[in-house]
Each structure stands twice: as C-alpha cells, then as structure tokens.
Image (tube, helix red, strand yellow):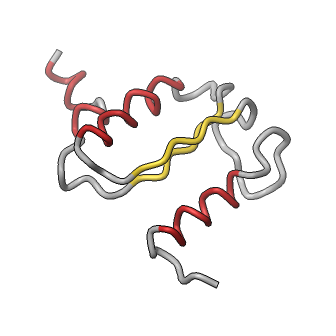
Amino acid sequence: MQLIAEFSNDEQVNSQTPITFLVQAENDDVLPLMNSINYFPALKKNKIKSELHIYDDGGHRFGLGNTPGNKNRTTACEAWLRANNLILAQ
C-alpha cells in the first residue's frame, strides 16, 4: 500500500507543487482518466492554480496536429499560459 501512495500523483501534491494545466482524452488507452480527475481536486485542496480539460477523443498522445475532437486544446493551453504570465501576452 505504501508504494501505491508513493506512486500516486494525487497523494504527492503539496504547497510546493507547481501550477498545473491538465489535459486528457477519455479514450486514452494508456493512462486512466481517473488519474487526472483525482489529481485535480488534490491541486485545489492545496490551493495550486490549475485547470483540467477532458476531451472525448485524442487517445494517449494528442500531438500538435488537428486531431478530431480536441482542436481547442492548444488554444486553451496558450490562454492558460498567458493568464498565468508564463508566456508573454500579445
């Protein structure tokens, strides 16, 4: 049980965890969607600025192309980066 806790990202969140932008597809066949869903409230509980975006399609890797079902993910990420002063506003 201790190893499960050590390797569960949501169990490792603390006040030093960096702000986080989460994006995942429901049809990811490598990582369970619940990983991101469980991680998000752990971030909020520790007052870490974060956003969670879940897309119907995209599998495990989105790439930077126009995969159907998640065309807005790069726009959402860019807006979040700008809003958090991680890239310069235009």
Q: In which image quadrant can residue 35 be found?
A: top left
* Residue appearing at x 31%, y 36% in the figure: 9
Farthest top residue in view: 1
Residue furthest left in the image: 2
Residue 85 location, x and y as percent? 45, 75
- In this rendering, is residue 9 above or below 50? above
Residue at point 36% right, 57% down? Answer: 19
The correct choice, above or below, for 90 with respect to 1 in the image is below
User: x%, y% of residue 2?
Assistant: 14, 21
Q: In front: 73, or 49?
A: 49
Q: Position of residue 57 (x, y in %)?
A: 75, 33
Q: Position of residue 63 (x, y in %)?
A: 71, 53
Position of the N terminus, as image quadrant, is top left
Relative placement, left or right, of 21 versus 30 is left
Left or right of 68, for residue 55? left
- In the image shown, does 10 or 80 lie closer to the viewer? 80
Q: Nearer the viewer, residue 8 or 80?
A: 80
- In this rendering, the answer to whether 29 lies above or below 76 is above
Q: Quadrant of the C terminus?
A: bottom right
Q: Quadrant of residue 68?
A: top right
Q: Residue at x 68, y 35 (%)?
A: 55
